[in-house]
């Protein structure tokens, strides 16, 4: 017994010593020298001493790419195309890279360490992403767990975002700062501010940080990011389905639409559990009075308490979509809410004849 335990301890000891030696060797002995990182055929280039992750090198050189997990290798957002250099795909990357992406040279920037010259290809949009400094100008409590937080931009003072895009806010975490993604809820034409709608996630680093902010506090975020593309066809109907903090991109889209296309057909479906979770409804009903092409449906999924009054819909929101939306082609849909809601609504939309390319979604 004792001999077995002793030999196990010795084996573990040897293993740990080897691991420590490898780390030390990697840190102090491996000298990769200076490496050239070239992006989009040299439109951005910088020299970087090797041994650091590509994600941190890009950040240090003000090239901001999405990274919702703060570089831990658990979100799969930090994808870049590596055309030359980079070595073989690492086991930590494989869960996030599809087979077709492997062929195209897609890598996770937070896992890839720079050890040689690299040639990268990034979407042009990402080269326009900036780092912003902003000050909290107004906070509104929308429900028991959702706040609307408004930021006045300090540096730079202007943001160009498309409705549905998001920013990544820098929040202090127990193991160092982390970035977390939040959709911008202020309309695209309000270029001097950024508004977020944030639900407090129990134990959530960034949502706790944002919920504890006070007016006058300063924050840092990068952005805008995101693939949502509202069609520019002025008469193309837009269907918005959401729940909870999924309201953020939806609110941005609605206000942007009615500023540019006062008669554009738009249908809002918003699912809540109880009347306690309802927000912005009066504001949208008022907007619908001014724009008859705007239809607003809020539905409560939990039964009403006896004393409660409610003149909206009841039941799960995908059932309202199924009942009220006619079959037609050439429409765009944006779905923003919890994954089960998105799955149920996607099924309904497929039945109604929506093309996959016309359905965008964001899971909250
Ligand atoms: S930053 Fe999350 S996987 Fe790379």
Image (spheres, rainbow, N blue to C red):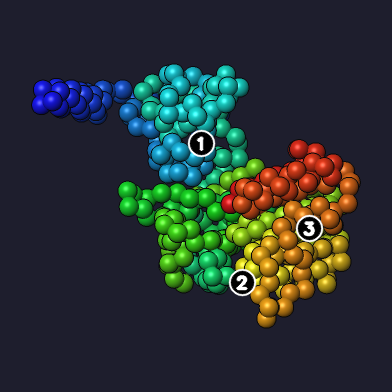
Q: Gap in Å between the C-alphas at discs 3 and 2?
A: 20 Å
- N-terminal of the two: label 1 or label 2? 1
Q: Quadrant of the N terminus?
A: top left
The residue that disc 3 covers is 320
Q: How far across and down, in percent of the image, does residue 220 sit?
A: 45, 56
The residue depicted at 60 percent of the width and 36 percent of the height is 124
Quadrant of res 285: bottom right
Quadrant of res 57: top left
Visible residue check, residue 69: yes
The residue depicted at 60 percent of the width and 56 percent of the height is 184
Mark 3 crowdedness (10 Å alpha carbons): few <14, some 14-19, many ≥20: some
Q: Gap in Å between the C-alphas at discs 1 and 2?
A: 35 Å
Numbered mark located on residue 76 in the image:
1
Ligand 1 neighbours mark 1 (CB distance < 8 Å): yes
Q: Secondary structure at mark 3?
A: helix
Compared with residue 232, is residue 184 higher up or lower down, i.e. above or below?
below
Q: Nearer the viewer, mark 1 or mark 2?
A: 2
Ligand 1 neighbours mark 2 (CB distance < 8 Å): no
Q: Residue furthest front?
A: 1
Q: Secondary structure at mark 1?
A: loop
The residue depicted at 87 percent of the width and 43 percent of the height is 329
């Amino acid at each position: 017994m004792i001999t077995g335990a002793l030999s196990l301890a010795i084996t573990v000891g040897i293993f740990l010593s080897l691991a420590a030696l490898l780390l030390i060797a990697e840190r102090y002995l491996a000298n990769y020298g200076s490496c050239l990182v070239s992006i989009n055929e040299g439109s951005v280039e910088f020299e970087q001493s090797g041994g650091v992750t590509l994600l941190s090198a890009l950040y240090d050189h003000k090239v901001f790419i999405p990274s919702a997990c703060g570089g831990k290798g658990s979100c799969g957002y930090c994808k870049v195309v590596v055309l030359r250099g980079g070595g073989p795909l690492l086991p930590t990357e494989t869960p996030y890279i599809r087979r077709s992406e492997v062929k195209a040279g897609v890598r996770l920037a937070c896992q890839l360490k720079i050890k040689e010259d690299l040639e990268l290809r990034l979407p042009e949009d990402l080269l326009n992403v900036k780092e912003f400094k902003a000050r909290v100008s107004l906070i509104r409590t929308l429900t028991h767990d959702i706040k609307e937080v408004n930021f006045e931009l300090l540096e730079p003072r202007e943001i160009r975002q498309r409705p549905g895009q998001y920013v990544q806010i820098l929040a202090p975490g127990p193991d160092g700062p982390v970035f977390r993604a939040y959709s911008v809820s202020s309309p695209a034409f309000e270029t001097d501010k950024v508004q977020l709608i944030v639900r407090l996630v129990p134990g959530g680093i960034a949502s706790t940080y944002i919920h504890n902010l006070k007016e006058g506090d300063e924050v840092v975020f990068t952005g805008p990011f995101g693939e949502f593309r509202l069609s520019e066809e002025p008469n193309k109907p837009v269907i918005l389905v959401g729940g909870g903090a999924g309201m953020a991109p939806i609110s941005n889209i609605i206000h942007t639409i009615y500023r540019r296309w006062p008669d554009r057909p738009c249908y809002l479906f918003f699912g809540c559990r109880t009347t306690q979770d309802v927000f912005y409804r009066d504001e949208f009903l008022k907007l619908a009075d001014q724009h008859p092409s705007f239809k607003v449906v809020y539905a409560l999924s939990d039964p009403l308490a006896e004393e409660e009054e409610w003149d909206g819909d009841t039941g799960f929101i995908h059932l309202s979509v199924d009942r009220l939306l006619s079959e037609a082609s050439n429409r765009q849909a944006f779905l923003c809410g919890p994954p089960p809601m998105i799955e149920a609504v996607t099924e309904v939309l497929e039945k109604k004849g929506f093309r996959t390319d016309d359905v965008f979604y964001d899971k909250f």
